[in-house]
Amino acid sequence: MAFELTIDHLPDLSLGAALLGTGGGGDPHAGRLLAAQAIRTNGNITVLDLDDLADDDFVVPTAMIGAPSVLVERIPAGNEPVDALRALERLLGRTATATMPIESGGINSMIPLFVAGTVGLPVVDGDGMGRAFPELQMETFGIYGCPGSPLAIADERGYSGIVDTGQDNKKMEKYARALATSMGGVGYVAEYPMSGADVKRTAIPRTLSLALRLGRTLREAREQHRDPVEALSETLSETLYESSGVVFEGKVIDVLRKTDGGFTKGSAKLVSFDGGSTCQIDFQNEFLLARVDDRPAIVVPDLITVLHAETGEPITAERLRYGHRVRVFAIGTPEIMRTPEALDTFGPRAFGIDLDFVPFEQLAASKIGSSV
Amino acid sequence: MAFELTIDHLPDLSLGAALLGTGGGGDPHAGRLLAAQAIRTNGNITVLDLDDLADDDFVVPTAMIGAPSVLVERIPAGNEPVDALRALERLLGRTATATMPIESGGINSMIPLFVAGTVGLPVVDGDGMGRAFPELQMETFGIYGCPGSPLAIADERGYSGIVDTGQDNKKMEKYARALATSMGGVGYVAEYPMSGADVKRTAIPRTLSLALRLGRTLREAREQHRDPVEALSETLSETLYESSGVVFEGKVIDVLRKTDGGFTKGSAKLVSFDGGSTCQIDFQNEFLLARVDDRPAIVVPDLITVLHAETGEPITAERLRYGHRVRVFAIGTPEIMRTPEALDTFGPRAFGIDLDFVPFEQLAASKIGSSV
């Protein structure tokens, strides 16, 4: 069901987006400021459920691409994602009837809100990643047959580029990434233009309201001095992300981190509070693999979140430090993200991890089984 | 006056294009093969004089961009520049009535012939560089008010990109170069879409037939055992490039060459046959500055050509080697390339050379004056 998103929703949404960012996703702060400005100027934003879309609606997702660390130092001039939308509309000779996120988590939960607020469009409650991923081809839109091309990209001067690689979304990512890099590290894109029918068929539903609910859950748990993880699990059980659970508790003893090819890559080592157990988390912008005592415990695309042990505040790969006391919390992805074609695109092997995907619930069950 | 370009013209054109490549421009060989194939399949190509254009003609220049050294190893699939032309036509909703070169020299003298022959368009006898230059903004088209945007770029799979940077042709170059690099080092572009009236106002006329004449002159001089440089000067005196002359004769004693940011950069040192005089030639793909006894003798955009001492064969910066016996031959550029606005774009300071442009004829005259 459609609802009105107000400026008061933004703090919860931002917190929930950080959680779904699963260690990456980019700082939602700059995007949140832009979204707030748009709402202050033009009023609340209508959020449409997938069921509210007409089959012949024309939906154009909008997003930021590039190094989130650059964005911190390069404030958007403000119109870039709108410029990208307009460039794509001109090319296709059609006007969007809605925008939506391509990913849930971090700054890209906010950019479509800024666009929607600025140009007076509704935003669709769903996305194509169901979490944060580092590359533009990692989209259920594309996995289920909707090409990302043509993609429009805009810089802070209103200059634009178009990339058209037909059905090849991986090549689209490559060319768009090259343009974003030449634009100074950050570009704003409009891509995966789709009919309402296509969105209903390919999107992961209700991920914007999911981020909102998760953020609200964390805030209220804190206010009510309730265990944040218990509260999160309760909220998640009512959604498509129904399975969740803590796989490890302990403190961070080492973090290796390097910047490589525009990504933040590395791993974190943790030890349990009693010293009897270890955990290693590998990341490429986002957390990709958590091993407990050298056995896989959470594997991408399942969500690996690292939460502050007491407050439940999500900690990003970038901020993770020696001495942090954390809980490693798994969130199982919906079935639409666990199909063979989905795993081809954003399963462990797509990140060079030589493992088959196994849902974290099964990994947890087999661990219990083996310890009996 | 229009003329028919046949397959028999290509060897002379290729030789003349190497000369106008002024040390760079890329090997015309692959382009020549493509042009020959198109003529063999579809017949001769009509070459239009600027005067033959109607004001409302729609002219779309076509070219290759990227590292010429990559091209040697990556044979074009054949349709890339046509794909770029078609992508730009689709974007603009207009069909080109002619194509033309953006530069004279090297492979880009050939690419428009391939396009013209393949799609059955005439090619315009003129270009926007009047020689070879390394970057896309170095065009009289842009200098005299015609933007290069929108630019279409295509790769060997038919994938395309569009770059639109409004009036900012330097930024267009930057973004298009990033795409060409991500395409594997080479891309094919259609850019500077112009009316016939704009072409007549901004192009350097008759540079395609100039290349043809210079190539023929060199060939005939060889056949007639005539001094090639004398023959070239005689031919040039009848064109817009009326001034020319040898500024140095000697042998190459050292060449420093490195690949830097996609360019071949370096310098060559020469000593006269009697050992009494030296010459240094700096290059960035193309030869940019020739100094004789530490005094500037030829400064970009005037053409610096290095000719084999006996045969007059042009030698590129890439092929220049210790022991080569050469003549350094200057060709003065037409007035349209020596205006203050032209020098802002492709004069010495545009290449980081801290010198004012002085026509080589004046430099030669002042040297004679001072030696009296």
Image (cartoon, coloured by chain):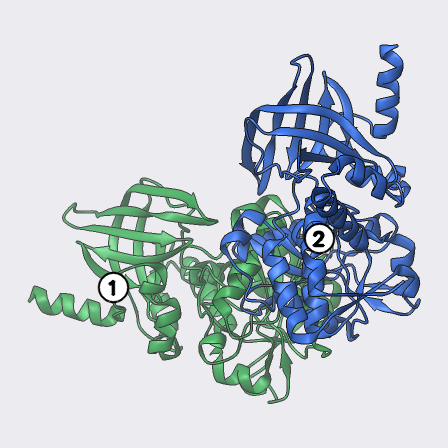
Chain colours: A blue, B green
The quarter holding residue A350 reads top right
Q: Residue furthest top?
A: A372
Asked whether B69 or A226 is in front, the reply is A226
**Where residue B355 is drawn, which disc sits there?**
1
- Residue under pointer 2: A12
Front position in the image: B13 or A304: A304
Quadrant (top left, top right, bottom left, bottom right) of the C terminus of chain B: bottom left
* Residue in view at x 31 percent, y 47 percent: B268
User: Does any portion of residue B43 appear in the rendered image?
Assistant: no
Residue B120 position in % (x across, y down): 72, 72
* Badge 1 density bin: few <14, some 14–19, many ≥20, Cα 10 Å: few
Coordinates of residue A273 in the picture (x, y in percent): 65, 19
Amino acid type, callout 1: Leu
Q: CA distance from mark 2 to mark 1?
A: 60 Å
Q: Name the outermost residue toward the left.
A: B372
Compare residues A188 and B152 and report the one nearer the observer. Answer: A188
Marks 2, 1: nearer the viewer:
2
